[in-house]
Image: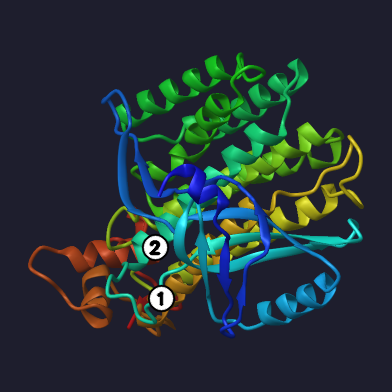
Amino acid sequence: MSWKERVESDIIITTGDGKIYTPMYKISPLSDSFNIAEFNFPNIPGTKIDRREIKGSKYTVDLYFQGENHLEEVASFRESSKDKRPWIVSHPMHGTLTMHPASIRYDPSGLNVTKVTVSLLETITEDNPKITVGPTEQASRFIIQATEASDEAFANQVVATSSDSNLLTNNLSDIYDEASTQVTLNDQANEYFNLFNDANNKIINVISEPLFAINAVKNTIMYPSLFSISVKARLTILSDQFTGLYSAIATLITPNEKKIFENNASSLVSGMLQTVLNPLDELDFENTTDVLSAITTLTDTYDTYILGLDSLQTDNGGDETSFIPDFDLNLALYNAIYYTVSQLFVIALSAKQERIEYISNDSNLISLTHRFLGLEPNDSTIDQFIRINKIGLNEFLQIKKGREIKYYV
């Protein structure tokens, strides 16, 4: 079929209740996107892009119902849209797709014609897709969606000024200074420093290339989530960075300043999520207490982030000084935080539970380890007992009566 024949063809919409509609329509673009994961490796230039399956297509179409009975047709179409089953949309340009309406806008201001704007999302039809995704991979996808949405929101909504460039530079410097002294590996310290310098160089061009600048800032902000230290230590670093950023929230006046906070703060939350997905070893989540502590840090920080956005939001988005938090970013971040926390609760339910006892007599390290953890030929349980109970050198030979002892069962 030639393109002329396609243009002259009708759009055919079969709604979930089986009714068929063939209104006039306006040709609009279709977009495809892919599940993408981006990986940066220390000391290796460039970025590894892992492209997985294509996502469902999406497009927005303007439909026009006209004629004497168009209001009745629109009313019928609106009633049909309430059926939750998917639509079959045969578009002359985009082909036949199974789709769900994400939003529908009715505009009857044309009097003899009603314009109906429909945002459509392609859906799969299987109730139980055969491909299963592991919890860590799914959580990673949510985090990627949140960080990509954050970058896009900044690039599309911020027309940066020199003062915005200064604010980005100051925020990044404070964040870097908080974490740079806590890197334990030289390779990671060098990589973090290189990311910091790269971000500062790109911030200089934030007015002309906002997406490159904010992406570099995000990469720097999230890098401490990969430090080779415990999950608890990394969460503390990111939480302290968030607290420092949040402390200046009352000074943010312009929409750009508020958008910078939204971007930087959401990147820190995403970094915390990435932290719990990358435990250093099996000791990070060996007991329920550690898991619940991580959950508390995550949810407290996220709740504070949302409260901060609420305080920055204006009554409406109708003038140049308005600020409305970005919907796509915050929906993606919501999905990421609550999915990750739900998986942490699963871990908590299967993790060891904390017990505390106070010894009734003087004892020693070997005897108490044997009593509460058992002894191993490689002395691993002794090391574990020392770590759990923070045993100092002065207690290696004798642990006195009344001392609190923690262990896990």
Residue 53 picture location, percent across and down: 32, 55
Residue 340 picture location, percent across and down: 47, 65
Residue at the far left: name it. Answer: 377
Secondary structure state at the residue bearing disc 1 = loop
Mark 1 neighbour class, 10 Å CA radius: few under 14, some 14 to 19, many 20 or more: few
Which amino acid lies under the numbered mark 2 shown in the image of this protein? Gln
**Residue occupying image coordinates x 71% and y 39%:** 261
Which amino acid lies under the numbered mark 1 shown in the image of this protein? Thr
Residue 315 picture location, percent across and down: 92, 52
Mark 2 neighbour class, 10 Å CA radius: few under 14, some 14 to 19, many 20 or more: some
**Between 306 and 156, the one nearer to me in the picture:** 156
Q: Which residue is mark 2?
A: 138
Residue 218 picture location, percent across and down: 53, 35
Secondary structure state at the residue bearing disc 2 = helix
Where residue 279 sits, quadrant-wise, is bottom left
**Residue occupying image coordinates x 44% and y 25%:** 195
Query: Can you see residue 397?
Result: no
Asked if 23 appears above or below 322 in the picture, the reply is: below
